Image (tube, rainbow, N blue to C red):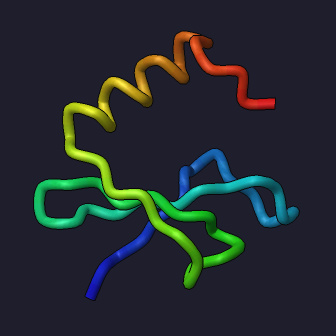
Amino acid sequence: MTQWRKSSHSNTSGGNCVEVADLAGNIGVRDSKDPNGPQLTLDATTWRTLTHRIKNGDHNLL
């Protein structure tokens, strides 16, 4: 069974959250409010690049 997890920065106020899961060498990403909805699957290198760019402010997330 896939174990999905939210960031430790998430709270219970119903904000915008994503969940991630280890999928046999890939990373799964989904909307925590719609767990049966669409999911992204990224390879580990793409995931690291994406999270690095988000942390550096390369993506406007608002």
Q: Position of residue 9 (x, y in %)?
A: 64, 45
Q: Residue at x 71, y 21 (%)?
A: 60
Q: Could you say which quadrant of the image residue 52 lies in? A: top left
Q: Residue furthest left?
A: 25
Q: List x then y, in percent, for residue 14.
A: 84, 65
> Splitting the image into 4 quarters, where does residue 13 fall?
bottom right
Query: Can you say which quadrant of the picture contains the C terminus?
Result: top right
Residue 17: x and y in percent read 67, 55
Position of 60 with respect to 8 (left or right) is right
In the picture, measured across the screen, residue 28 lies left or right of residue 25, that is right
Closer to the camera in the image, 19 or 11: 19
Question: Is 32 left or right of 23, judged from the image as shown?
Answer: right
Is 17 located above or below residue 3 in the figure?
above
Residue 33 against residue 49 in the figure, above or below: below
Q: Residue at x 12, y 55 (%)?
A: 25
Q: x, y (%) of residue 16?
A: 76, 53
Name the image quarter holding residue 32.
bottom right
- At 62% across and 20% down in the image, what residue appears? 59
In front: 27, or 4? 27
Q: Residue at x 75, y 57 (%)?
A: 11
Residue reaching furthest bottom?
1
Name the outermost residue toward the front.
38
The mark total stands at 0
